[in-house]
Amino acid sequence: MGFGDKAYSTLVKRDLEVERELPEQARADIPSNALRLIGAHALQSSGDQATKTSTVLPWLFYSLGVPPALTGVLVPIRESGSMLPQAFLTPLVLRVRHRKWVFVTGALIQAVTVAAMAMTAAVGSGLAAGVVIVVALTIFSLGRCLGSISSKDVQGRTVPKGQRGQINGLATIASGLVALTLGLGVRLFGGEDLRADQLAWLLAGGAACWVGVAAVYAGIREPADVESTPPAHPEAEQQAPGAVVQSWALLRDDRDFRLFVTVRSLLLVSALSPPFVVTLAVSSGMEGLAGLGSFIIASGLAALIGGGIFGRWADRSSAGLMSAGAAMASVVIVALVVIVTLPAFSEESAWSDFLFVGCFFLLTLLHTGVRVGRKTYVVDMAEGDQRTTYVAVSNSAMGVILLVVGGVSSLLAIAAVEWALLFLAGMGIVGVYAARRLPNVSHGAS
């Protein structure tokens, strides 16, 4: 047994009987491919920390003097921009024999755009800088879109059921370590002064991470006997002019897939609520790099703790994990709103900073679980090109839904941030009940 096999067997609970279901070539490459997946996704998550639309970019906009109106479009552009085009791009992806190159292309696009953000942070200011960063973020989202379409397919080809959730969890742990180190550095050495040039270096580090993602992912070996060729998929040619119609037909006719998309839509509570918690914290007077460092540390700890716990949970029941994470996130939000609306609550108290960072940590931790569960569920519920189509169509649908839900929550936030949080918590509670109808597709269910 080589070093890669020993390392993988130490990190992951393996089922050799399930591994035999993969082609012979794929079985031999499982350890090395899995370790590369872990490394690439850890670097990817680390790069994401540098461009986080819930923490880093809003603080950067504040430092550059960008009008607040532009800050409100960061999360919708980042999330919807990476999802909406997927149904349209899927026919092109299906023509690519080695899907890993789609992911590598997306990683390089993200590296270039994050580097552009870093340059803008170093030399720009005001509205012009904000517009350039928003444009770069839009192109960044397109690269993210390519990665999202292809990554699930590559993982499904190279890693068997029962190990995919653990792979996602280990990648999350690794990214958490990086985020924790970064947050501690920002917290200890950043102080209370918030300068754009400091954040420019943070963004430059993120661009370097994306270059590393591309290099590591390029070494993955996809089994040749499951690779698709253009002639094998004439339906891709037919889908291109009517991607919207084809996507709608899939949602209409595939009951289980439609239910998954519905449940995923209702479980946005853990994804969209953290920025509102940051907004509450900033409005209470929490400023400077030290404050930003606290939120980055919270993100890192959440990933570090949640990765291992939720990875194995997802392999047992990814549907149950999504439901439990959303339920607990809703409880956290309701508790926070109750506390901040109490007459005795004081924003000037040191406990207020602890409250906001603590709630941000819990929501990020629970979102880690929801995200790991969701990624594992969609990989396990289908095989081959159907998996690619499921990922693309569900993400395109979520792009539209995110714009709608984000718009409603933003309108509610104009009246009071607390109303936006309660709206998201209510959606989460409904989603928990809807998730009970999801079929269990995990290996632990068989």
Image (cartoon, rainbow, N blue to C red):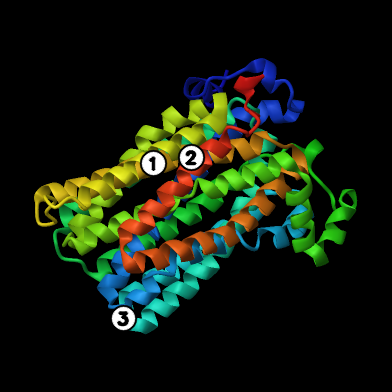
Residue lying at 35% horizontally and 33% vertically, measured from the top left: 305
Sequence-wise, the earlier of marks 1 and 2 is 1
Q: CA distance from mark 1 to mark 2?
A: 10 Å
Amino acid at dot 3: Ser
Amino acid at dot 2: Val
Q: Nearer the viewer, residue 147 or 212?
A: 147
The N terminus: image quadrant: top right
- Res 281 visible: yes
Q: Which residue is mark 1?
A: 329
Mark 2, secondary structure of its residue: helix
Mark 3, secondary structure of its residue: loop
Residue lying at 48% horizontally and 20% vertically, measured from the top left: 10
Mark 1, secondary structure of its residue: helix
Mark nearest the camera among 1 and 2 is 1
State the image quarter where residue 362 is shown: top left
Q: Which residue is mark 2?
A: 370
- Res 180 visible: no
Note whether 30 is above or below 43 in the view shown: above
Asked if residue 193 lies left or right of residue 269, the reply is: left
Q: Residues within 10 Å of mark 1 (few under 14, many from 20)?
A: many
Q: Residues within 10 Å of mark 3 (few under 14, many from 20)?
A: some
The C terminus: image quadrant: top right
Amino acid at dot 1: Ala
| Residue contact between numbered discs 1 and 3, judged by CB atoms under 8 Å | no
Asked if residue 248 lies left or right of residue 305, the reply is: right
Q: Residue furthest toward the left?
A: 349
State the image quarter where residue 52 is shown: bottom left
